[in-house]
Image (cartoon, helix red, strand yellow):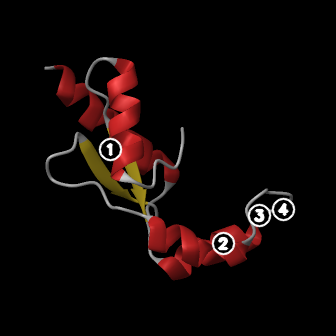
Amino acid sequence: SCSALKRAYRDHITAKAGRPVAFVFLDGGPDLLARRIAARKGHFMPPSLLASQLSTLERPGDDELARAFDVALPVDEIVAQALDWLLQLQD
């Protein structure tokens, strides 16, 4: 996993892979993300960096092999949705 905040990063990853790469975009509102970051203990990223990370973020475009998943959902639901999408790509 990685943040791949910018399109150029995702393009670089895809180019280096030499084949299509599917990106699972975990999407959440700033308030929810801030609460979750603040609740983490011993993590390298302080809550003060969230605003700059969100301003840097270039959401995946319609022409990218990416899909957004709402992080407000339970983790098992996100995993099930992402897995379903990834399996559909194999068809």
- Answer left or right for 76 relative to 25: right
| Residue on which the image places disc 2 | 49
Identify the secondary structure beneath mark 1: helix
Q: Position of residue 27 (x, y in %)?
A: 40, 62
Q: Earlier in the sequence, mark 1 or mark 3?
A: 3
Residue indicated by mark 4: 41
Q: Secondary structure at mark 4?
A: loop
Q: Please tell me whether mark 4 or mark 1 is closer to you in this view.
A: 4
Q: Residue at x 56, y 78 (%)?
A: 51
Query: Can you tell which quarter of the image residue 13 is in?
Result: top left
Mark 3 Cα-neighbour bin, 10 Å: few <14, some 14–19, many ≥20:
few
Amino acid carrying mark 4 in the image? Lys
**Amino acid at circle 3:** Arg
- Classify mark 2: helix, strand or loop: helix
Q: CA distance from mark 2 to mark 3?
A: 14 Å
Q: Nearer the viewer, mark 4 or mark 2?
A: 2
- Locate the N terminus by quadrant: top right
- The numbered mark at residue 81 is 1
Asked whether the beta carbons under mark 3 and mark 4 sit within 8 Å of each other, the answer is yes
Instruction: Identify the mark nearer the N-term, 2 or 3.
Output: 3
Within the image, what quadrant is residue 70 found in?
bottom left
Tell me the number on the disc at residue 40.
3
Foreground of the two, 53 or 86:
53
Mark 1 or mark 3: which is in front? 3
Mark 4 and mark 1: Cα distance apart in space: 28 Å
Q: Nearer the viewer, mark 2 or mark 3?
A: 2
